[in-house]
Amino acid sequence: MPSASSNYQQENQTPLYRDKNLLIIFAVSLITFLVLASVPPAFPKIIQALNVPPQKIGLLISVFSLPSLVLGPVVGVLADRFGRKKILVPSLVLFGIAGTACAFARDFNVLLFFCFLQGIGGASLHSLTIALISDLYSGTRRTTAIGYNTSIINASTATYSIIGGALAILGWHYPFFLSLAAIPVALLVWFGLKNPEPATEEPPKVDWFYALKILKNPQLAGLFIASTAQFMLLYGAFRTYLPLLIANSFKSSSFVIGLILASIPVAIAIAASQVGRLARRFPETTLIRASFVFYAVALLSVPFVSNLWSLLIQTVMFGIGFGICSPIILSLVAARASKEYLATVISVNGAFCNLGRIIGPMLMGVAFGIGGISGVFYAGAAIAIATLLIFKYFRSCFCA
């Protein structure tokens, strides 16, 4: 008997850009990375205002991402068991309330606590948007929708970087007020989203150990490693320590920092919008490996930049690689998951992305302590090259 999801996919042939449900999913995606984009331009000011050692500023990203590492697979299981909206709506509300509370913190430890609470709210957002897209679409249509979603995320991330940089001129805490936007989006999801949910009469059995079992799949394991590595590089090197390099080496304002950081998601959005075409011309694993070559070259060359605006070459190069790699990984993960455990598998991938966000800033903090700001980017290049070699091994599993 066809599932509700397959019936919807057969019936729903509305052009993607006119699909009301996809537009609502886009609204959730606009919230997902709001804090991670708007706050980093304020890092230099937070260091000064709250007397934070530079090696510890990355804890803001790590603490925000930690709940996703622990709760991500659990949230996926609950979403498969009870439905997407029952998990998504409370998550958005908590995200908005805790994020606003961050703006009133005047001690770094208190700020970390509220960031942790906000991270609990944000733990499900990205994974469930991908699960919803996979519920509603299949095949090339799904890959295209994920590519559009990635473009939306990164277009908004660019905007948030600029807005966050501008608000930080007024005070380090102002970017956190943007979190309030999650509340109306929660209402929009609850009253407007029409998606296939698990049948309430006989919901699927919960297998709490399924998230661990799927790690034995070599194809998924290779994709999870690539996900972890690219988020380590994005949030460890570029989002945490590039603002410090710009502020200290070029004596630039938080607004300029926001402009430079905005170039990364702009490049990601443009590249992601073309990923469907690229996937029809080149093997998907080849595109993933090419992305890590882009990462390595971009990171290696950052320490040699002597002009502020020349940094745009490195940020755009990194963004192109990320815009190609990220949606392909998501599509491959979704294609290898059964419908019964779709949200669980996608949430596990999300947990690995957040593992990268947690480890990246801390590892780059160690690199900063050893080799200064240049050491951060050399360490990042080494991670990119190592991941390229590791993924080359797992690539053979896709051909088996």
Image: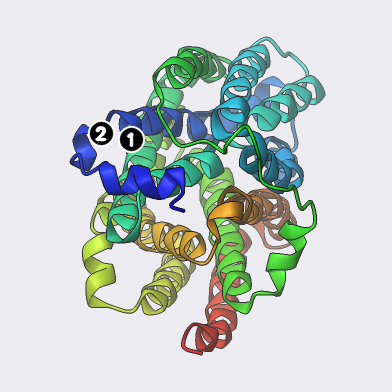
| Lateral position of residue 56 relative to residue 103, left or right | right
x then y, percent, for residue 49 = 67, 20
Q: Residue at x 23, y 58 (%)?
A: 274
Q: Which mark is residue 232?
A: none
**Front position in the image: 268 or 73:** 73
Q: Is residue 67 above or below residue 234?
A: above
Residue type, mark 1 in image: Leu
Q: Which residue is mark 2?
A: 19
Q: Residues within 10 Å of mark 2 (few under 14, many from 20)?
A: few
Location of residue 195 (image quadrant):
top left
x then y, percent, for residue 385 = 54, 77
Q: Residues within 10 Å of mark 1 (few under 14, many from 20)?
A: many
| Lateral position of residue 365 relative to residue 42, left or right | right
**Front position in the image: 226 or 174:** 226
Q: Residue at x 59, y 70 (%)?
A: 220
Q: Is residue 230 above or below residue 93?
A: below
**Front position in the image: 281 or 361:** 281
Q: Which residue is mark 1?
A: 22
Q: Is residue 97 above or below residue 266?
A: above
x then y, percent, for residue 228 = 61, 60
Q: Is residue 314 above or below residue 222?
A: above
Is the residue under label 1 in contact with that under label 2 (CB below 8 Å)?
yes
Q: CA distance from mark 2 to mark 1?
A: 5 Å
Location of residue 295 (image quadrant):
bottom left
Q: Residue at x 37, y 55 (%)?
A: 319
Q: Residue furthest front?
A: 1
**Front position in the image: 321 or 259:** 321
| Lateral position of residue 43 relative to residue 78, left or right | left
